[in-house]
Amino acid sequence: MKVVSLSTFIFIFLCTFSYSANADINSVEATIDRNPVMLDEAIRLTVTADGSADRDAFDSSPLLKDFVVGRTSVSSQTSIVNFDTKRTTVWTTTLFPRKEGTFTIPALSVEGKSTKPIRVKVIPVQEQGQGSVARDYYVTTDIDLKEAYLNQQLLYTVKLYLSGSIERGSLQAPEMQNADIKQLGEDKQYSDIVNGKRYQIIERQFAVIPQASGEFTLRGPIFTGEVLAPNTNQRFGFFNRTQQINRVGPDITITIKPIPQGIDYPWLPSEMVRVDEEWPQGDQFIAGEPVTRIVTLTALGVVEEQLPDIPEFYPPSFKLYPDQSTTTTVERDQNLISQRQTSLAIIPTQPGSYVLPEVTIPWFNTLTEKTEYATIAARTINVVSPNAKTAAQPLAPSATSNTATDVKENDNVSEKNAASLNENETNAAAQTTPETSATDRIWFYTACVSLLVSTLLLVGWIYTGIKLRRIKRLLQSPSGYVAAPQGNQQIVNNTESDAFKFLLKTLTKQDVKASEGALVKWLAALESENKPRALPGNIPETKAIKPYFDALVALRFSPSQANVKSQSNKQIFVDLLDAVKTSRKQWLDKESEKAQRLSTLYPAG
């Protein structure tokens, strides 16, 4: 008799085990944990394959037609009894119905084997039975506006109702296509009685800012948690049995309206927009000395990326040194508040009287559905030479001279009064020592200093109170500024061709303010370098424009513009138009030459 070696036996056993383990699956079965199911509940779908199956063989995409499919987990088990190998693979997934009605979980295929379809009835929340555990936990959703404009902030509120303690849980954020969703503040926790049952309520709020127009569905958030299972009949042991619960908040359909027609400025929908400045006291400045101007733009219900640039126009005789603007977004009273702040160092170089034009920022009031303007009023400043400042300082010696004269006159009066004193009073006065007189002066100076310090503290307290009230109005005021005249239009398209067409149009109208802004926009389109401000002469092709541009700016910043329509001033626009056309031709020729040179360096093919 031939003896089989141990190694040969092990080889035959492994081959038999491998063949059994990799045999085709025998059957596939699908089951659900509840039917019917309420609208805000989740269905647990279990798919079991009898036999060896690949872990990725289950495809949940056929379920997406009527359900929202949650995370899918997979487990496998292998057992060997009398050399008979049995293996099962189990997939478990969570399904969230989004509508009421009767739906069918279709047949699911796993490696050639299919499950039987399952009909599921989804009932409204109001049809739950009395005393049902399902109503111990549920989620509600609400939104302040179901119809809004593009980029307008919507306030979305989620409330989680808990009638008992939970071991652990998580609440996902809502979802919506083409929307920016941010949580506002921290969660609020409080208790309330609903339909005779006490609940612990967790409230969370979100700011929803739509990024596209149309009709959208705001998907409710999903709550997943673990609670103690009822009737466990467990008397001993360190661990309590728990069961998992899933709840989903109701969906909300909202309509987002597009930007209204006729809006030719950067779109800024808000309930309140304001612009403020920090400017040194007084309107007289010294030539050559820097002055810092800080302008702050504040908008309610928008994110900082939506804030437009703050326009800046100054006379050509001013040197400008801008700092990089800063933006920030904070949360106040269930709203987002965004700010853009620019700081600019200004150095006037020539004495004279100048008019700084008003700063105007258009915005769309979502309450009145009208365009309004946040403005800083124009101001007139006087710049004097440094010599004028020095000449204005001999006031102190004059005051000293007057004081000395008064002292002398008082001394004469004192001598006359001293002559009329009686002898005793004269002797008593004669006994006053120099130390007593010095002590009186010290007390007098101390009292003066104390009075001065008290006055400064009082002034500082009043100034601080005014600033605090101003900040409070900034954060709480529901209204904006009074609308300014609708004359400050901006170019939406920044291409060179469109900027040039707009410039020709404004020069033909002979509008001083609009022509200057259009010229700066066109010059910015010509330049490839990022300079603080586009001006004639920044590139060689525009040097011819500079004298006519300076004449235009001088005309705009003149304290009196009564003769703007005079013949001589009309000639400024004619000359400026000719210079612009000449400079543009030179620029186009240069760009064409660059293109030809590039074609020569890199020939086609």
Image: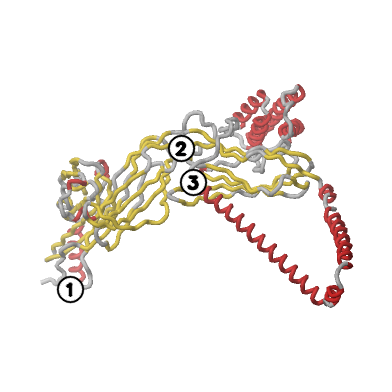
Q: Amino acid at mark 1?
A: Phe
Q: What x and y, as percent, mark residue 588?
A: 67, 30
- Toward which corner of the image does residue 245 lie, by quadrant? bottom left
Q: Nearer the viewer, residue 24 or 147?
A: 147
Residue on which disc 1 sits: 236
Task: Determine if residue 117 is in view.
Answer: no
Q: What x and y, as percent, mark residue 19?
A: 19, 58
Q: What x and y, as percent, mark residue 53?
A: 22, 54
Instruction: Determine whether, in the image, residue 564 is placed left or right of residue 485.
Output: right
Quarter containing the N terminus: bottom left
The numbered mark at residue 318 is none
Q: Nearer the viewer, mark 3 or mark 2?
A: 2
Q: Nearer the viewer, residue 107 or 326?
A: 326
Residue on which disc 3 sits: 303
Residue on which disc 2 sits: 366
Q: Secondary structure at mark 2?
A: loop
Q: Badges 1 and 3: C-beta atoms under 8 Å apart?
A: no
- Toward which corner of the image does residue 451 lie, by quadrant? bottom right
Instruction: Determine whether, in the image, residue 252 is placed left or right of residue 547.
Output: left
Q: Amino acid at mark 2?
A: Thr
